[in-house]
Image (cartoon, grey):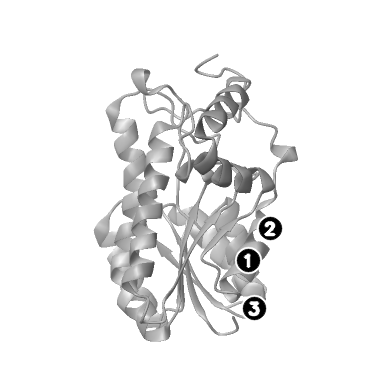
Amino acid sequence: MKDKVVIITGASSGIGLATAREFASIGSKVVLAARSQEAIIQVENELKQKGYEVFAVKTDVTLMEDCKNLIDRTLEKYGKIDVLINNAGISMRALFVDTDIEVLKKLMDVNFWGTVYCTKYALPHLIKTKGSLVGISSVAGYHGLPGRSGYSASKFAMHGFMETLRIENLKNGLHVMILCAGFTKSEIRKHALTADGSQQGFTPREEEKMMMPEQVAKKLIRAIRRKKRIKILTIEGQLIALLQRIVPEVVDRGAYKALAKEPDSPFK
């Protein structure tokens, strides 16, 4: 991965930040994208102080123009793109019957359309380098999760989009990978949207028992090197992806019971 040009969206925190640090440490040229100018500049300064080659571009992935600007500025700076990691994402927690429809639109705008916009402008250049197109997803893209209708819908959409691109580019040498990280310690649950669109403000799960983003980053880079098609990082996730094809009703009940146990769960 030395000297490879890697674009990472949602690079200011969580998996995105850990992945940026890991790629930079092995000699990649990392383009940092996030919607917070202050946060992304802070990450850029941190990595530059260590002597790493990084470049920050303020990007709101819900805006097509921002995504085009991200790709254009990367090409101006480095002249190529080797890896695009579509990591920017948000979550939600509320029953669909109670949820404002704008919440679902926002989930789709960030998680699905953000991936589509960035990929649209990067794809010709990834094909030139026979590079890697990556979508950071979840087992919620394999089986619907109660209380996460918008999140699951956006991840199902991402999966269909990525798999189609893989098939369309079978003869182009493009590597397309979906990585399902499982529950990872991050701020995503604190920022998850509630029924009215406000942020949840707390995490309903035991963060200290989750996978660390640094672990995800190392596994992600290893999977890219090995040109994996799909990488599901947890045994629980692998079981869900398998069982939902065989005994989906069992997965339904298991998901209901597990998520109903969360503090302040929207259902019991």
Q: Type of residue at label 3? A: Gly
In the picture, residue 184 is in which quadrant? top right
Kindly identify the residue that appears in the image at 33 percent across and 34 percent down.
104
Q: Local crowd at mark 1 within 10 Å, few (<14), some, or many (≥20)?
A: many
> Residue 16's spot in the image, x, y percent?
55, 57
Relative image position of residue 45 (x, y in whole percent): 58, 66
**Residue occupied by mark 3:** 51
Of circles 1 and 3, which is in front? Answer: 1
Residue placed furthest toward the right: 209
Disc 1 on helix, strand or loop?
Answer: helix
For residue 136, above or below residue 220: above
Query: Which comes sooner in the sequence, label 1 or label 3?
Result: 1
Quadrant holding the C terminus: top right
Q: Residue at x 70, y 32 (%)?
A: 206
Which residue in the protein does label 2 denote?
214
Mark 1, residue position: 21
* Percent coordinates x, y for residue 233 in the rendering: 64, 54
Q: Which mark is residue 118?
A: none
**Is there CB contact under 8 Å for labels 1 and 3?**
no
In the rendered image, the residue lying farthest to the front is 246
